[in-house]
Image (cartoon, rainbow, N blue to C red):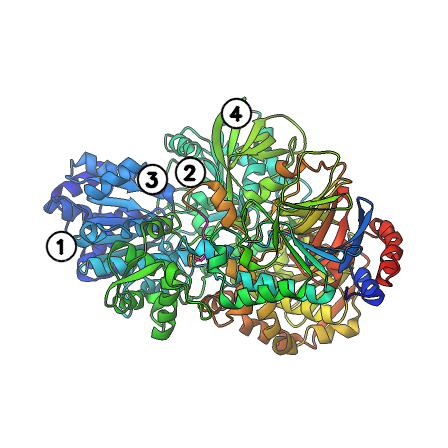
Amino acid sequence: MASRLPKPFYQWLRSRGWSLRDYQRSMLSAAKAHHATLLIAPTGAGKTLSGFLPSLADLYRQPQTGLHTLYISPLKALTNDVQRNLMDPVEAMSLPVTIETRTGDTPSHKRQRQRKKPPNILLTTPESLMLLLSYADAPTLFSGLKTVIIDEIHSLVSNKRGDFTALALARLQYLAPDMRRIGLSATVADPAAIAGWLGETGTPAHIIDVPHTVKPNIRLLDSRERMPFGGFMARYAMQEVYEAISAANTALVFVNTRAQAELVFQMLWEENKNGLPIALYHGSLSKEQRRKTEALMSSGGLRAIVSTSALELGIDWGDVDLVIQIGAPKGVSRLLQRIGRSNHRLNEPSQALLVPANRFEAVECRAAMSAIAAGELDGDALLPGALDILPQFILNCACSAPASIESIYQQVLNAPPYQGVERQLFERLWQFTVDGGYALRAYERYRRMEEVSPGEFVPASKRVIQRHRQNIGTIVEAGRLKVKRIRRGNQGKIIGEVEEYFAQQLVPGDTFLFAGEVLRFEAIRDMQLHAKPTKGGEPKIPSYAGGQMPMSTFLADGVRHILDTPTAWKTLPRQVQEWLALQGEFSALPDSNKVLVEQFSYRKANYVLFYTFEGRKANQTLGMLMTRRMEKLKLKPLSFSVTDYGLSVCLLEKIDESLLSSLFQPDILGDELENWMLHAPMLKRSFRQVAVVSGLTEQHYHSSHKTMKQVTFSTDLIYDTLREHDPDHILLTVTRSDAERELLDLQRLADTLIRFHDKLQFVDLPKVSPMAIPIVLDVRSEQVKGAGAHAIIEQANLYQEAEDMMDEIKALLRGDR
Amino acid sequence: MAIDEHWLNEAVRAHRVHPVRFAGHTFLLDGRGVLYCPVRDALVVSDLHLEKGSFLGQFANPIPQFDSLSTLRRLNTILDDYSPRTVVCLGDSFHDKGAFERLGTQERQLLQTLIGQCEQWYWILGNHDPEIPRAFGGVGVESVRWQGVVFRHEPERDPTLSQIVGHYHPKCRAVIARRRYSGRCFVRNDRLMIMPAFGQYTGGLDINHEALLSWLAPREREVFLTFDKKVYAVSRASV
């Protein structure tokens, strides 16, 4: 009977004081009966073990050599954690099963050995899997594969990394036709969508949905301190956060960005009079540092960890009994996932404390709490697969074995996000992979792939293969520099990485906060940032472009609802209620029937804020179009920034109420959109990603750094060149669809413009309104190149000398030398 | 000389050009990244790096190889404005030895036309192009000296010279009234003027990089930022 476990398993479960749960039993039968099974269960339900039970039972009955089960996790840290947890039953029952991890951190000798002599169960990440698939021995390695388990699957749907994973699954299925798929997911808004993603095209996965039984216990901090109007660091609340940590056994403190993590960690240590062991964890710290923290945590040696989303997925250690969220929760599902990190017992409620950094965030926290109480979740709509990943996939297949267009096309269609890709489009992407696909110039000599027999293509050289392997992956990151903590001379230890962009702003002597201490910048040598530990000063904080999380649209609606319903304010901390009342008196409160527009001066410029509550994408597009229209009206826009609530434009001129209707006007979609699409810096940004992902330019280059320097001229230049000389090039098509996918949300914007264009409430204010403070303090703004920017760059006092020289030149021009 | 007083007034007013005095002469810095010398009716352009795209292509980099065409067309537009008697290319005009062969027909013809329009065309030799085939037209030279000013690719450590050079591809980031600007730039002191690179696919070196600081220290340098085809003097405090 497939749905029964072998005897020793029952004994083992009993010895742990567990019993087989109903859904775990259904997993056993479902995994046999279906090609793909999706298990949706709340955290703490033993989800990961459930995914492995069928494989472990199978291997117990029929011990084998070679790969049986592949486990794919979105996080490296998770593979280590899962290995730890699996070794327990394997050792307790002396199962004849070998288990190993393989990630970017795995030493190369071990990786080579794994290809020759693979373990029964291999735990890996999507990038490492794709790399494995690029080797010539991939067909042999995977031919006997029986099961693939994809963990935290909800975090892979509707992003490029997920698209990439879907393609890898399709390739695996081609190599191992009998392979079964098991997906593990946290509770999501739309299980059917994920089931469709997990199965092969046209065959959605069978769903086992374990309901949430116990609602978490969430508290919103009602601080005794004064809560600020703006800011994102929650310094005011640190003492209370520390008290909460002291009262708990082990607490996880989640923040939204790495910069926040560094600062919060620093502030907590300032409070830490009792010397509690509190650690810091984020993705830019070195592997050794992260491993140390993970080990300390699992042995119960820590009272708290300050962490970014790097720890939010599935890691299962210690006795975390409190989750503290600092800053806005950004999304209901995300918050629930984070809260689920505490108390891994299914029948007891998780405990959480929400600490908003400013008063606006308090409203957002409240909206998220209401949604959780009502059992509502936010979810991203499913997007078609990103096209720039296809050239990478094509080359990856060809690296492993000669590839034909038809065979690869069929594999691509079998990945659900790519089921709609048309043959003609695929052929252009194929041609791009072969020779760059340029219309004007054929580059016979510079092919990336060549035809070895009719219809069969292989990479043109070893070099192509090598470069491809070094650049596998879809997550485009800014250039990174390793941080070396110098003790004396040039001696020291690598403690992590910062973005090149941040490093370039530093001059020797500057101090910055990293890995929990203050460092003084010395120099950049050999692609390393050298810095010495120091004390005091006002340290800068490294910022990471990739670290920002967009908020879900769903939550933005919740916030609008609270603002619009004064009776709901009672549930907010008193300080927040006072702030809302103040906003109502000083300016106005946004309501559902009008769009509030505020104008005020701030830092010598003029700001106009549109409270649309239409989400980041739609606001971003509105910002681009609006500033173009403003440029036309000679209002000299300088920059704009968006939040999920609205759009803030900074300009030199003041706007008049009569102008509003021509700004917030549906026709900006027609007039400006096409123009914008062609010239937008946003499109250049998309191109930057597309160029790297599709292999047009590389992040890593095999030889020296000097060579890399030569290659890394700006992709903006390539974009301009391509648009001028080959406007129909496939990558421009891809860029455009990428921008539409990631940025536009045109439908939503059009609806808003039509609905509200004559329903604006304009308020001209002497200074910043209470509600606008967190928005104008958000520095991530989009610069506008136009008359305004030119007006500012002109530092008038520098041109006196020039005036004097003019006469001389004019004399020359007249010919009297 | 094609420019006139009217053109000059307009261009200076709109920050398309900026006059500077160097070694006792007046020069015009053009926001498109070239330098014009009115007394000599000469246009100076640096680091064209022609055929860099196809150079990278040889290493299976599928980058679009229209860079030479773009570079030459931009240069053509500028030459139309000034119609100079002399053109001085300050070195690294070709990205590598094989560039001459790889140059496409269209690019080759355009380049020959440009050379043919001038009375004199100097190819100053750079580290990327230590030789220029004679058949190409123009004269390959180590340096050009003229009334106390030396035009060469890389500067020499000789404090008695006034030098105009390329090689370093200077760029800068400036913060002016809380806004960030960045772009290729001219950077100079009393004795040395370093030109921005002109080639389509040329990256840049920040003026605060040690290689550039060793020539032009912050206290004595002046920076002229090119931004959106215009050129702006930038105060020392902003860079």
Distance CA(mark 2)–CA(mark 4): 40 Å
Disc number placed over residue A2 in the picture, else none: 1
Magenta-span inclusion, residue A699: yes
The amino acid sitting under disc 2 is Val
In the picture of the structure, the residue carrying the numbered disc 3 is A81
Local secondary structure at mark 2: loop
Judge from the rendering whether residue B28 lies leftward or rightward of residue B171; answer left or right: right
Nearer to the camera, B3 or B60:
B3
In the picture of the structure, the residue carrying the numbered disc 2 is A320
**Mark 2 touching mark 1, by CB under 8 A?**
no
Distance CA(mark 4)–CA(mark 3): 35 Å
Distance CA(mark 1)–CA(mark 4): 62 Å
Q: Which of marks 1 and 3 is nearer the N terminus?
A: 1
The residue mark sitting in front, 2 or 3, is 3
Please provide the residue range marked out in magenta.
A696-700
Distance CA(mark 1)–CA(mark 3): 28 Å
- Crowding near pointer 1: few (<14 within 10 Å), some, many (20+)? some
Disc number placed over residue A490 in the picture, else none: 4
Chain for disc number 2: A
Q: Earlier in the sequence, mark 2 or mark 4?
A: 2
The amino acid sitting under disc 1 is Ala
